[in-house]
Amino acid sequence: MRAAHPTAQLTVWAEDEHRLGLLPVIRRVWARRGQRPTAWVRRRYQWLYVSAIVRPTTGQSWWALVPSVTTAAMTQVLAAFAQDEGIDAMHRAVLVLDGAGWHTSKRLVVPDGIDLVFLPPASPELQPVERVWRLVDEPVANRTFTDLNEMTDLLVTRCQTLRAARRQIKAHTNFHWWAIERRRRIR
């Protein structure tokens, strides 16, 4: 990558999606001895997806809530990410992602400056963003929602909080073997 773009600033990011919906996220809770905790459940099957793009070496993150995971949605996510983060031919981003169909589709439009690198099949343990989903789930765990709008409002707030929590994101995603970004030496 460095040889192909010797003068460009290069950053390494990871991307993944997480499905949430009206089917509750159930977690263990503390309770008094002898008392059984309860969590109300209203089973309904409506979904939305949280798309997270994380730069593990710095904890920088970018978030989007999308109604579905399709090639069109992924194209919009990549375009918005590139625009918001100032990615272009001179400020390139290597984006590490899994081999989901909407990531590998020939119809996917990848903005100039983003280079996609795919993880091996069935290897979520290699995806740094997988470790962020527990943080995203915290405010929705053991709760029921009347509709997706109520959940969306809560998730928008949570994603904004996590975007500002760079230290926490870095602690969860910066694996010891993750790519090290090196500054180019000027001679």
Image (cartoon, rainbow, N blue to C red):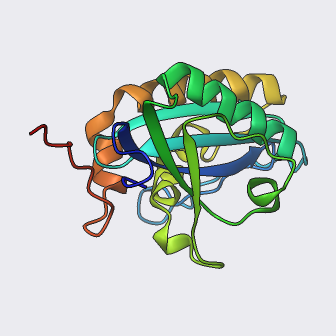
Does residue 6 appear left or right of residue 154 in this picture? left
Residue 170 position in % (x across, y down)? 30, 47
Q: Residue at x 80, y 46 (%)?
A: 108
Residue 69 position in % (x across, y down)? 81, 47
Residue 2 visible in image: yes
> Which image quadrant for residue 55?
top left
Of 129 and 96, the residue lying toward us: 96
- Residue extending farthest to the left is 187
Q: Residue at x 64, y 53 (%)?
A: 38
Q: Residue at x 80, y 50 (%)?
A: 23
| Image quarter of the C terminus | top left
Q: How many marks?
A: 0
Q: Is residue 6 above or below residue 154?
A: below
| Image quarter of the N terminus | bottom left
Residue 70 visible in image: no
Of 87 and 39, the residue lying toward us: 87
Of 79 and 3, the residue lying toward us: 3
Residue 133 position in % (x across, y down)? 54, 51
- Residue extending farthest to the right is 45
Q: Is residue 170 above or below residue 178?
A: above
Does residue 98 appear left or right of residue 2 in this picture? right
Q: Residue at x 87, y 48 (%)?
A: 107
Residue 87 position in % (x across, y down)? 50, 28
Of 63 and 72, the residue lying toward us: 72
Q: Is residue 117 above or below residue 62?
A: below
> Which image quadrant for residue 48?
top right
